[in-house]
Every structure is written in C-alpha cells, then in structure tokens.
Amino acid sequence: AIATGADIELAKKSTIEGILKRGELRVGFESGYIPFEMTDKKGKFVGFDMDLAKEIAKAMGVKLKLINTAFDGVIPALNTGKFDMIISGMTITQERNLKVNFSDPYITVGQTILVAKKHEGIVTSYKNLNDPKYTVACRLGTTGEKAVRRYISKATIRSFETEAEGILEVINGNADAFVYDLPLCVVYMAQQGAEKLVFLDKPFTFEPLGIAINKGDPDFLNWLNNFMKQIKNDGRYDRMYNKWIKS
Ligand code: ARG
C-alpha cells in the first residue's frame, strides 16, 4: 500500500504503527558485549539481547533487522529514527533517561574488576586502585568508564574502543585492571583468566539494563513492559537466561 500523509504522521507518533507498516522491527546495538551481543564465527549476531529482539519481533509478527552501531552513537541514532529500539546491554542511567525512555529492566548487573594476577591479595577493591601508579582500563562511553572516572579518579585511566582491547592490555601487562559489567568479566575470566587475572566479582555499582525507545510514545512503552512481564513468567526469559548468562 502507498503511505498517505496521514499514515506518515501516525508512524512518526507511534513506533508500533511504523513497525507494523514496515513489517520490520529495527534494533540498534553494538556487538562485543559478551554474552548479550557478539558476532559468531559465521559473522552472525548472537547473544541474550539478540534472542530478546527475536522474541519481540515474533510477538509483533514482523521481521527483525539488527543494526550494529558504535555504542557511543547509539542513542543519537535512535533519536534520529535509525531504528525503533536499542537493546544493547544498556544501563538505565538518569543521564540517558533524559534522552530516551527505558522499559522495565531485564537484568541487573554492576561494575566488577579484572586485575592483573601480580596484584593478587594487594588490590582487593576498587579503592586500592585509586592511585596514579595504577593504570585502569575501561571501555569508552560505558557506565564502566563513568564508574572509573568517578570512583577511581586518581588512577591513570585509559579508555578503549572495544572491551576486548581493554582486557588485552591487562593480559599483556600494560594495564593493572579492567573495569566492566559483571557478565562480560565472568566470560573473560573463564576464557583467559586463570593464570593471568584475578576477578573482583562483587559489583560496586547498581545497574539495571533496559530497552531504550524514543520518548513521547507511551503506547510502545506499555507494549514493551507488558511483553517483559509476560516473558519473565512464561518460561521464555528463563530459557534465554539459562542459555546465555547462567554459569
Ligand atoms: N552496561 C554498560 C553501559 O550501559 C555497557 C553496555 C555496553 N554495550 C555494548 N553493546 N557494548 O554503559
């Protein structure tokens, strides 16, 4: 069907109308936040968030389009209509919440620390790292970076474009610690941690993760929150959680 002026006006106001008309849900995210979004050997995007996106598209009866976007540009891209929602392990922060609306959280995480093995028993908390003699690596544009700049501000801080680069610096002995969301640190610790890292796995921040949508669309927010409540109680959420996160 040809979209009329009235259709276009409605689609602008109502994300749901736009998605249904298009027959496609467009989800923005950034690959690399294991186990929520990552790229498998075949170049396919997989993870908890990707399964969540699939369930949403299925429930809306539309196709799914995944749009990989740099994390620090993902909110501006949503705001300019590049996609319908962000599912990117995004922490609901008051600062971001001024620019977007968030669904009810789908998991709560917090910042944890991977420390170079040589500091075992010496660095036992983020507080010990608050000294210029320590180099602390973090991921640009994330709440991890925010936490480092706020709570470990006296350390020598180095921000990286990807999570993997930040952790590699610690493994290679160029940084003393990497600060990031618990679930990613759990995975890296299991993969390459044993001999090289110590894991301070008690989160020192409180971070609920939610789906972000554009402001001014209560219909869509209502749909998403009811969807969330449904999957949390009918087994779908538990299946995803057990598949990707439970360790
Ligand atoms: N939870 C953290 C934040 O909101 C990290 C999210 C990073 N997500 C990603 N897809 N790289 O800042």
Image (cartoon, rainbow, N blue to C red):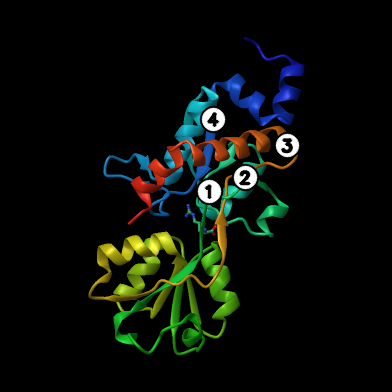
- Residue type marked 2: Ser
Q: CA distance from mark 2 to mark 3?
A: 11 Å
For mark 3, give the secondary structure. helix
The answer to which of marks 2 and 4 sits earlier in the sequence is 4
Q: CA distance from mark 4 to mark 1?
A: 19 Å
Q: Mark 1 touching mark 2, by CB under 8 A?
A: yes
Report the disc number at residue 106.
Answer: 1
Residue lying at 60% horizontally and 22% vertically, measured from the top left = 20
In this rendering, which labeled residue sits more in front, label 4 or label 3?
3
Apparent side of residue 226 relative to residue 232 in the rendered image (left or right): right
Q: Name the residue that disc number 2 marks.
A: 103
Question: For the residue carrying disc 3, how many other residues have a C-alpha within 10 Å: few (<14), some (14-19), or many (20+)?
Answer: few
Residue 199: x, y in percent? Answer: 36, 74
Question: For the residue carrying disc 2, how many other residues have a C-alpha within 10 Å: few (<14), some (14-19), or many (20+)?
Answer: many
Q: Name the residue that disc number 4 marks.
A: 25
Residue farthest toward the left in the current orientation of the protein: 195
The answer to which of marks 4 and 3 sits earlier in the sequence is 4
Q: Quadrant of residue 114?
A: bottom left
Q: CA distance from mark 2 to mark 4?
A: 16 Å
In which quadrant is the C terminus drawn? bottom left
Q: Name the residue that disc number 3 marks.
A: 218
- Residue type marked 1: Tyr
For mark 2, give the secondary structure. loop
In this rendering, which labeled residue sits more in front, label 2 or label 4?
2
Q: CA distance from mark 3 to mark 1?
A: 19 Å
The answer to which of marks 2 and 3 sits earlier in the sequence is 2
- Residue type marked 3: Pro
User: From the viewer's perspective, is residue 189 above or below residue 78?
Assistant: below
Residue 115: x, y in percent? Answer: 37, 78
Residue lying at 74% horizontally and 30% vertically, measured from the top left = 13
User: From the viewer's perspective, is residue 236 above or below residue 142?
Assistant: above
Q: Mark 2 touching mark 4, by CB under 8 A?
A: no
